[in-house]
């Protein structure tokens, strides 16, 4: 997904391939929409999720990162400026896991799945 040599992964890559822009932005946006839906039982826009979560912050969730991804998407801007934020994805995921109250066993399995996904970026 990211421009990199065969011996590197997303943690050492410096930029995204253009074909991966949409998927990366969705990855940044998903935690906000997920938390919004979980807390309200509704499906809403990314803007509605950011507004809602700014009023009801979730511990560990970087709402500013989600808002920056919304602005980037709305402006059809190059998301490479947000690529350094990929290191925040595990903590974004953890905030979602804590919100829904996964027990330790499921939390470990979910984090392992996320780790495999992030290594593909």
Image: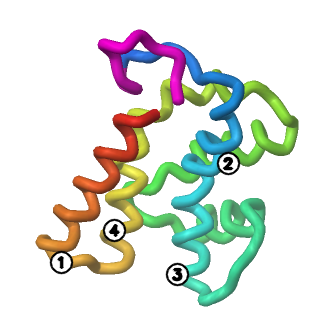
Q: Earlier in the sequence, mark 4 or mark 2?
A: 2
- Give the distance between the C-alpha atoms of the residues marked 4 and 1, in whole angstroms: 9 Å
Q: Which residue position is annotated with label 1? A: 103
Residue at 63 percent of width and 50 percent of height: 26
- Give the distance between the C-alpha atoms of the residues marked 3 and 4, in whole angstroms: 11 Å
Q: Which mark is residue 38?
A: 3
Secondary structure predominantly adopted by residues drawn in magenta: loop
Q: Earlier in the sequence, mark 3 or mark 1?
A: 3
Residue at 56 percent of width and 49 percent of height: 27
Q: Residues within 10 Å of mark 2 (few under 14, many from 20)?
A: many
Residue at 53 percent of width and 16 percent of height: 3
> In which image quadrant can residue 77 be found?
top right
Numbered range of the magenta stretch:
1-11
- Give the distance between the C-alpha atoms of the residues marked 3 and 2, in whole angstroms: 18 Å
Above or below — where is 25 with respect to 37? above
Q: Secondary structure at mark 3?
A: helix
Query: Residue 119: image x %, image y %?
Result: 35, 35
Above or below — where is 50 with respect to 71? below
- Give the distance between the C-alpha atoms of the residues marked 4 and 2, in whole angstroms: 20 Å
> In which image quadrant can residue 120 be found?
top left
Q: Which residue position is annotated with label 4? A: 97
Q: Nearer the viewer, mark 4 or mark 2?
A: 4
Q: Earlier in the sequence, mark 3 or mark 4?
A: 3
User: Looking at the image, do the residues carrying marks 4 and 2 touch, with CB atoms under 8 Å apart?
Assistant: no
Q: Secondary structure at mark 2?
A: helix
């Amino acid at each position: 997904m990211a421009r990199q040599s065969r011996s590197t992964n997303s943690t050492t890559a410096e930029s995204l391939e253009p074909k991966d822009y949409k998927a990366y932005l969705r990855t940044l946006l998903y935690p906000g929409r997920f938390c919004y839906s979980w807390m309200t039982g509704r499906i809403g826009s990314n803007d509605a999720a950011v507004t809602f979560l700014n009023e009801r912050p979730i511990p560990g969730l970087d709402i500013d990162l989600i808002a920056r991804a919304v602005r980037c998407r709305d402006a059809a801007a190059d998301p490479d400026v947000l690529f350094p934020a990929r290191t925040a994805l595990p903590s974004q995921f953890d905030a979602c896991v804590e919100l829904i109250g996964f027990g330790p066993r499921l939390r470990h399995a979910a984090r392992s799945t996320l780790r495999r996904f992030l290594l593909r970026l």
